[in-house]
């Protein structure tokens, strides 16, 4: 029976429903329902709800016909194809910096009554995302325009070594039509233009599939007084308008970057004494048009953020269409302008790559520092001791996004330069700044290795400290030193998740400081680190040469690993599934800061769950438990927030292996902080959370006061048996994050939740002698 099919009247239906939501990595409906015969009752090939074949008509059957049934009707919501479907998902690796900067938008600290400061925080992140788009397109221009068309095609030895560039070389082609410098640049501009078009296409295609999925309409609820999260707003999972605006702006920014790269060198030649006056005038007019359109792009990015208080179905069609079209027209004009005949113009040296990449790095540094100041101000208004890095996680993640963009840009440029000029003598190669940035990579890795060594020592000591606790939990078992050490070590390794903020802080701080040093060194010396250190102390000179060589090798190795991983993921389904797991965590959030980030699967999954829960409860008046594992518990909580209060009050939550507080509450405190989770606990009828000390992902919800033990059960035993027993004649495995259903406590807690729920109205919270809820 589908969601809209016939249903029994509430008074005629005693049906209870358990909606299972799987976690990271996904699974099959057969495994979730523990039955080889399953039927899809609603949904499509991307995400769907399944039931056992025998339960398809459970609501329409009379109570007496459900022979042998003692539990709820299980349904499985399978959403794994939203993140790990086909081989094209491997291309999302190219969008990694965009995904990371988008996460920074959602990591702001909790703040109430500071709407302007919150808007400023979002604005700074959107501007940082815009610089990443410009950086990616500038890197493509560096490869196609500078290294290939300007340097290699302009050098006889390099052009002869690559015959496909012969028609662009004035020496090899005997002064052919395409050999003029401006025409070479105009032709090479097709490469970054195609990249920009590909990004627009991917964003537009996923926008139609994800952002255009309308959530179930419901009235908004007040947030300021009781700390409700913004995830309950009617328009939170509907970002169609904002993503369309940002897509238009970022596409126009990419095209304007290409137009500036094509026309700037020609304009510089025209400004020289004796240059053509007409072309000089046209060049200045073109530059003014580029600046004006660039200002319009920045205005569009700054003008409007997310609209979440209602379903914003409007679409700025004129802006979405005309802004990229205007940038495309300017790019065509720039290509015509650069391709005009200019006697005596020859390609020498490099294009203005150092100034371009230096300006981008400088702006990114300013944005990150300003973002850190705003985040600190927000954190001071409402301090949360559990928030990661005292509210500075967002700026730290934005720093890593900029660093990833720089490393990817430098890696591609360096590898292409090595390919075009294997001897290193025919062309100058990439800009000096990219070499400096590569040279600081070994220093950053050295800092990280030192911190990892410190973490390793702390983990070893924590494992030693757990030995006594493990033995005390199995008092009647004969002791096995190896078994005890393994359990203790697993617990200590699982606790490393809580050290993540410190690791991120060390990484981002070292990256920011060393990146600033690389920028200063490149702009002041205008030479590579090895050449800039010539004549200094022998140690300094040797260290500079080693850092430069090692950095180039590491960035090349990273680029090769990046390409081979993506290629393997395209051909190998198991590797493709692994990459899908990474996106499960990184793409939960809507595209609020960058339209070219991988799409948000929750904008499909949360409305799916909300529609299913809302329509089922209205049709049957029955009882419902949402059973969410790992990332599925996050989707379950997000869906519960989107329900009407009357529906939410008849829903029970069973979460296990849940990162709701351990990861989302710490890293995204404005949306999953203590106040938000406490409000959720009071809104739903009942909530129980299960976790293990050996689980590196799941953890307690940690609600304050009496709410904490009311939600969190004591940590489950893992393994279930220390040694061989009558129930476990073979050694019991350490389950960690998996197979929570294997623990008898799971069935016990599920039965207690269902016992709490009433068919028509939520039951009162019963209290035992200790004052705690019986659920």
Image (spheres, grey):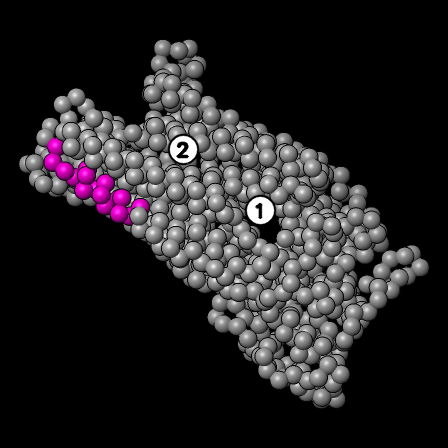
Residue 284 in which image quadrant: top left
Query: SS at mark 1?
Result: helix
For label 1, the crowd category at 10 Å Cα-Cα, with few meaning under 14, some 14 to 19 and many 20 or more, is many
Q: Is residue 706 visible?
A: yes
Q: Quadrant of the C terminus?
A: bottom right
The dot on residue 106 is: 1
Magenta includes 755?
A: no
Whether residue 364 sits left or right of residue 663 in the image: it is: left
Q: Which residues are magenta?
A: 327-342
**Coordinates of residue 761 in the picture (x, y in percent):** 78, 72
Q: Residue furthest right?
A: 769
Q: Residue at x 91, y 56 (%)?
A: 770
The residue depicted at 77 percent of the width and 63 percent of the height is 686
User: In the drawing, does residue 36 fall left or right of residue 85?
Assistant: right
Numbered circle sitting on residue 167? none
- Residue at the outermost left position: 174
Give the labeled residue for mark 2: 360
- 188 w.r.t. 308: above or below: above
**In the rendered view of the protein, which quadrant contains the N terminus?**
bottom right
User: Is residue 338 shown in magenta?
Assistant: yes
Depth check, front residue: 295 or 484: 295
């Amino acid at each position: 029976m589908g969601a809209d099919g016939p249903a029994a009247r509430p008074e005629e239906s005693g049906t209870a429903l358990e909606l299972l939501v799987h976690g990271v990595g996904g699974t099959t409906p057969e495994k979730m329902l523990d039955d080889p015969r399953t039927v899809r009752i609603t949904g499509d090939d991307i995400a769907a709800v399944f039931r056992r074949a025998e339960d398809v008509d459970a609501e329409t059957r009379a109570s007496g016909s459900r022979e042998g049934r003692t539990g709820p009707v299980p349904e499985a919501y399978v959403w794994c194809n939203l993140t790990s479907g086909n081989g094209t998902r491997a291309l999302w690796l190219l969008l990694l910096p965009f995904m990371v900067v988008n996460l920074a938008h959602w990591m702001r600290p909790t703040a109430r009554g500071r709407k302007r400061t919150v808007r400023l925080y979002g604005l700074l992140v959107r501007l940082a995302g815009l610089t990443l788009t410009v950086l990616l397109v500038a890197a493509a221009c560096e490869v196609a325009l500078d290294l290939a068309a300007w340097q290699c095609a302009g050098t006889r030895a390099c052009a002869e070594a690559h015959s496909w560039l012969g028609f662009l070389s004035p020496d090899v082609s005997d002064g052919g039509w395409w050999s003029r410098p401006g025409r070479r640049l105009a032709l090479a501009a097709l490469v970054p233009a195609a990249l920009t078009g590909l990004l627009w296409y991917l964003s537009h295609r996923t926008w139609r599939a994800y952002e255009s999925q309308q959530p179930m309409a419901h009235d908004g609820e007040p947030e300021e007084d009781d700390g409700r999260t913004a995830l309950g707003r009617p328009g939170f999972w509907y970002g169609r308008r904002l993503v369309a605006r940002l897509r238009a702006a970022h596409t126009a920014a990419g095209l304007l970057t290409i137009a500036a790269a094509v026309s700037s060198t020609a304009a510089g030649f025209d400004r020289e004494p004796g240059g053509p006056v007409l072309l000089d005038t046209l060049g200045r007019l073109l530059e003014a048009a580029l600046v004006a359109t660039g200002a319009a792009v920045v205005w569009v990015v700054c003008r409007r953020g997310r609209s979440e208080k209602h379903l914003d179905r409007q679409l700025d069609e004129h802006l979405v269409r005309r802004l990229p079209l205007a940038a495309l027209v300017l790019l065509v004009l720039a290509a015509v302008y650069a391709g005009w005949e200019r006697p005596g113009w020859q390609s020498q040296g490099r294009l203005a790559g150092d100034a371009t990449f230096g300006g981008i790095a400088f702006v990114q540094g300013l944005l990150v520092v300003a973002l850190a100041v705003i985040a600190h101000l927000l954190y001071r208004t409402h301090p949360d001791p559990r928030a990661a890095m005292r509210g500075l996680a967002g700026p730290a993640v934005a720093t890593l996004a900029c660093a990833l963009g720089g490393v990817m840009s430098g890696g591609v440029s360096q590898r292409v330069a090595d390919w075009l000029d294997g001897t290193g003598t025919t062309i100058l190669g990439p800009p000096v700044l990219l070499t400096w940035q590569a040279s600081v990579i070994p220093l950053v890795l050295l800092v990280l290795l030192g911190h990892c060594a410190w973490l390793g020592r702390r983990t070893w000591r924590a494992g030693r400290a757990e030995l006594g606790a493990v033995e005390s939990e199995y008092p009647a078992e004969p002791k096995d030193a190896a078994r005890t050490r393994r359990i203790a070590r697993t617990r200590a390794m699982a606790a490393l998740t809580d050290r993540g903020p410190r690791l991120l802080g060390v990484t981002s701080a070292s990256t920011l400081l060393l990146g600033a040093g690389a920028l200063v060194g490149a702009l002041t010396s205008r030479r590579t680190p090895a050449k800039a250190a010539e004549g200094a102390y022998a140690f300094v000179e040797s260290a500079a040469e080693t850092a430069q060589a090692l950095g180039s090798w590491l960035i090349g190795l990273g680029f090769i690993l990046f390409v081979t991983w993506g290629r393997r993921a395209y051909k190998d389904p198991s590797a493709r599934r692994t990459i899908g797991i990474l996106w499960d965590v990184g793409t939960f959030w809507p595209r609020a800061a960058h339209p070219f980030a991988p799409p948000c699967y929750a904008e499909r999954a949360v409305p799916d769950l909300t529609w299913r829960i809302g329509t089922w409860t209205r049709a049957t008046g029955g009882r419902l438990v949402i059973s969410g594992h790992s990332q599925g518990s996050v989707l379950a909580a997000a869906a519960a927030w989107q329900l009407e209060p009357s529906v939410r009050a008849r829903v029970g939550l069973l979460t296990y292996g849940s990162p709701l507080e351990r990861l989302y509450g710490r890293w995204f405190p404005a949306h999953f902080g203590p106040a938000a989770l406490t409000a959720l606990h009071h809104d739903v009828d009942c909530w129980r959370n299960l976790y293990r000390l050996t689980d590196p992902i799941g953890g307690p919800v940690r609600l304050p006061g009496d709410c904490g033990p009311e939600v969190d059960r004591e940590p489950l035993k893992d393994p279930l048996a220390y040694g061989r027993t009558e129930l476990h004649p073979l050694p019991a495995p350490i389950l960690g994050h998996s197979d929570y259903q294997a623990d008898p406590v799971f069935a016990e807690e599920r039965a207690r939740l269902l016992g709490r729920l009433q068919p028509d109205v939520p039951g009162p919270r019963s209290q035992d002698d200790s004052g705690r809820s019986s659920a």
